[in-house]
Image: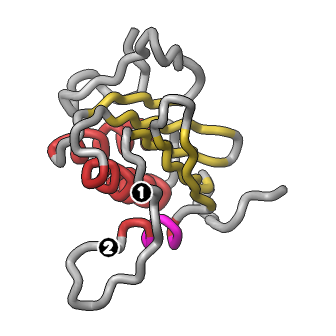
Amino acid sequence: MPIDTGAEAGTTGFHSFVCSDCNLGFGRHVHLHLRSAASEVGKARAAVGEALLSWGCPSGVVDDSRLLVSELLANAIKYAPDTWITLDLMEIGDRLLVEVTDGSAAQPVVHRAGPQEEQGRGMFLVQAIASAWGARRDRRGRKTTWCTVAIDGSGGTPPR
């Protein structure tokens, strides 16, 4: 069953589906299974952007979320080149939760890349933009890297 991202059908040529293994068809949620290929990043960014705009999120939140999705997916593609990647975007209260799951054993690390380095800033950007972030491993050994974004665009740490 297709998940309603609120986007006009066919605008990106990319559709998400609730798969029977995942059973995730609730609320405002985008659920995508992606090949570990750079070409999938643009498709995922477009689907996330369309969904967030249709949900009425501020443009800054849409832009930040698209960037975070790009960085998390780029890490998954780099460190898990031969696995399927799952992207979940969910609205939970006043936050967006972005989760990227892959088959890599490598834990995400924040690096401070030098000015001449062309790579290595992904998790630094995630740390700088997201309200919170982290990683966890499931029983099957798959890793999920996640981050949250304040829907009102205020950023900062969520209230406890």
Can residue 158 be seen from the camera position used here? yes
Label 1 or label 2, whichever comes before in sequence order: 1
Q: Which residue has dot 1 on it?
A: 68
User: Which quadrant of the figure has residue 64?
Assistant: bottom left
Question: Picture coordinates of residue 82 (x, y %)?
Answer: 22, 38
* Quarter of the image where the N terminus is located: top left
Callout 2 amino acid: Gly
* Residue that mark 2 sits on: 120
Instruction: Answer with left or right where residue 13 lies relative to residue 51.
Output: left
Q: Nearer the viewer, mark 1 or mark 2?
A: 2
Identify the residue shown where x is 62% and y is 56%: 150
Residue 152 relative to residue 35: left or right: right
Identify the residue shown where x is 42% and y is 77%. Answer: 111
Between marks 1 and 2, how big is the CA–CA gap?
14 Å
Q: Position of residue 76 (x, y in %)?
A: 33, 49
Asked if the magenta segment contains residue 117, the reply would be: no
* Kind of residue at badge 1: Leu
Residue 120's place in the image compared with 117, above or below, is above
